[in-house]
Amino acid sequence: MKNIIILIVIINAVIFSCKGPTPEPDSTPIKEPNGALVVKFTDSRLEGVSPDITLSNDDIFAISINIKKAPDGSKPVKMAVYITEAFAKRGILLLDNIKLKEIDEQTKSIELSLPPIGTTIHRIIYIDITDNKGKISRKAANIFSTASEQIISWTNINLGLQSSNLPSRFSSSTGDIYTTCDLDSNLNFVDITYATIGSSSIKPTFLSNPRRGALGLGVTASDKICTNVSVAGGTPTFYAPINVPIEFETVNNLFLQGLSIPNITQDLAIEAGKIYMFQNLRVTKNGKTVVRKGVIKINTISNYFPTTGGNIVSGLVNFDVKVQR
């Protein structure tokens, strides 16, 4: 795989928070990557010529990478995350020894918080993945600072019901629909899931991941590669019908910030053509509590009734999402 070209960008200082004093940047030159793992951002918008991310002080940096084994069979072992002030310098180590699975392909998500802006300097974040032969593959992105808090938008998302071939779990912060093999290591990022529940009237429903087990839905999953993967737990998401006038296309952070979402309902029956609001709470790797508010516009719901009667367990929902960073 071609090594990613890291562009030099002049931006406002964005120093990632950590417990205790901010560590001094290391001016040691960055070791050139020498591995051949195939690494891509799962957000295709970052796979262009200039992978740029815009953040404010109050935003949370959330990102996912997809990692495939190298042509020589090497597989990933661990991951580290750095931010550098100067091109080709090691900078500050943000996260280290993030354990990866030694499998042919996986998706890994991370998120970090940001403290106040400083002076104008270079800011490049890079992610190093070490394989089982000790070689390093790298992904990098430029971080731009802004005074305005950002939101994330995703369109045309499809989730499947219990026996559908489509996965049923989605992360609004990274845009990922996780496969079975990736679920156990990324469950904290899952904030929207889909199923049919209820008796005697079965209804299409959005649920938080912890709520699935509480309602008797399966807490293990298998596919042709991974078996008996735990899909239980995760962080709570609360849903409610939208209760204020809304133009979905113009939703911004100020609008989302003003939403009042009760921490009550973790499963909500949904209908096509309607808009719902949600709120997710979790803690980042570097210890910051994150509360994200968002809205979901339901485009279509396509369910299939079994010919023998009984519950609806196959079908899909298509929706758009806007959520705070």
Image (cartoon, helix red, strand yellow):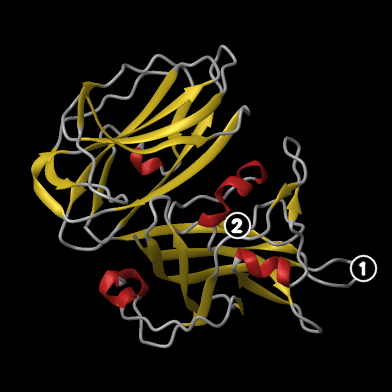
Comparing labels 1 and 2, the label whose residue is closer to the camera: 2
Q: Earlier in the sequence, mark 1 or mark 2?
A: 2
Q: Position of residue 107 (x, y in %)?
A: 53, 39
Q: Position of residue 196 (x, y in %)?
A: 72, 71
127 lies above or below 5: below
**Residue depicted at 30% across the width and 76% down the height:** 255
**Which residue is outermost to the right?**
308
Residue at which label 1 appears = 308
Is disc 1 surrounded by few (<14), some (14 to 19) or many (20+) residues within 10 Å?
few
Residue at which label 2 appears = 169
**Residue depicted at 27% across the width and 48% down the height:** 16
The residue closer to the viewer here, 90 or 294, is 90
Query: Would you say residue 99 is visible in this rendering?
Result: yes
260 lies above or below 315: below
Left or right: 252, with 128 as reference point: left
**Residue depicted at 62% across the width and 64% down the height:** 209
